Image: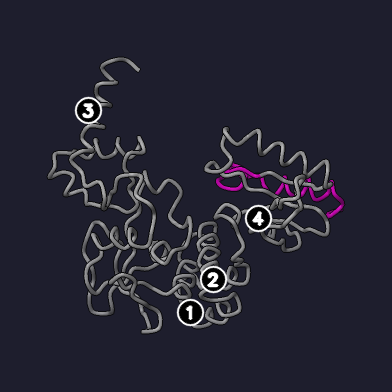
Amino acid sequence: MDSARLRRELDVMDQVRRLPPDRPFTSRLARDEGLTYDVLKRLVQLGVLLHPLRGVYYVSGLPDSLDLRVAVLALVVPRGAVVTDRVAAWLLGADRVLPPGAHLEVPAVSMFCLPGSRLRSKLVESGQRMLLRTDTEVIGGIRVTTPLRTACDVGRLLHRDQAIGVMDALAALDRFDVPRLVAEVERFKGFRGVRQLRYLAPLVDKRSGSPGEGTLRLRWIEVPLPRPECQVEVCGPDGRSLFVDIGLPDRRFGAEYFGEEFHGDEHREHDEARLEWLRDSKDWTITVARKHNVYGAGQDIDGLLIADARACGLLP
């Protein structure tokens, strides 16, 4: 990095001192303190600031907690609104439910009012939604859809590749079980997206380890292969348990989703050693999937699964 660029970066970093170090704040407050949008964007890129929701930031290093999530939403949610969909799941405590890269490209908050009123703010996606009294609860003074209602909404309204991961994470909160979710589907007969919800609801699994694993599970089921277990336990070389993301333990056939967050280059040696041990010592056939294998126009996970299933005699 040349000296001029280094000075610019240091100048940007120095501006963090103008911001609250212990609480979330709005972009308006940052502008009032003299920080431009470009400076805020660069601080997010450098990892100095986090940008969980549109219009809200906080200094990285603050521990994620319910109190922090409530404080973030309190800055943008007006009285009388109900937070819904993916942001509701986030407030309820579900893990990894915001879009990948949400700290860089942040979605608006989905929130709704009762019929007869409508929110108007560039920070929110708003409108009207029919909600029963039992569909909502209050967390830290913010009204939010319950885990069950949120699972039904994301199952209807998100792309199914994203919906299954959010639904899995909501199920992991142990506030509803899959039979209860399946029964709730019929309430939405005639609503937009109910066919997708009806398809996804029985496939939800609270044991799923990540959204990527959830999408991989969908691809596996649609090959079609027998429905896999999530987080299959295998006794490791030192007596401690290893876990295969999804698999058929009786056939020793499984698949792993190597997402960038936990399986980047710095983890490559460990991942390869673990896979080698499973294959050589336990006779497992493991299909490894990365983002490009599972998502996008060039996805090829079906072919990879079929080839490996044939190799272990699962398919003719």
Q: Which residue is drawn at 35% across and 52% down?
A: 52
Given the image, on which type of amino acid does mark 1 rest? Answer: Phe
Q: Decide: is 117 above or below 96.
A: below
Q: Which residue is at the front of the view, 254 or 116?
A: 254
Can you tell which of label 3 and label 1 is closer to the viewer?
3
What is the CA distance from the residue labelled 4 to the residue labelled 1? 26 Å
Circle 4 sits in a helix, a strand or a loop, which is it?
helix
Name the residue tied to disc 2: 197
Residue 188's tag is 1
Q: Name the residue under label 3.
A: 11
Asked if residue 301 is among those painted magenta in the image, a careful observer would answer yes
Kindly identify the residue that appears in the image at 77 percent across and 45 percent down: 237
Rendered view: 140 above or below 101: below
Residue 219 is tagged as 4
Give the Cα distance between marks 4 and 2.
Answer: 17 Å
- Tell me whether the residue at label 2 lies in contact with that at label 3, contact meaning CB atoms closer than 8 angstroms: no
Going by the numbered disc 3, the residue's amino acid type is: Asp
Q: In this view, does 262 lie to the left or right of 149?
A: right
Query: Residues under labels 2 and 3: Cα distance?
Result: 50 Å
CA–CA distance in space, label 3 to label 1 = 54 Å
Q: Which of the marked residues, 1 or 2, is nearer the chain's N terminus?
A: 1
Residue 297 percent coordinates (x, y): 57, 45
Tell me if mark 2 has few (under 14), some (14-19) or many (20+) residues whose alpha carbon lies within 10 angstroms of its own: many
Q: Which of marks 3 and 4 is nearer the N terminus?
A: 3
Ranked by sequence position, the earlier of labels 4 and 2 is 2
Which quadrant holds residue 247? bottom right
Q: Where is residue 12 in the image (x, y as percent from the top left)?
A: 24, 31
Residue at disc 3, secondary structure: helix
| CA separation in Å, label 1 and label 2 | 9 Å
User: What's the CA distance linking mark 3 and mark 4?
Assistant: 47 Å
**Depth-wise, is mark 2 or mark 3 nearer the camera?**
3
- Please say if the residues under marks 1 and 2 sit with CB atoms less than 8 Å apart: yes
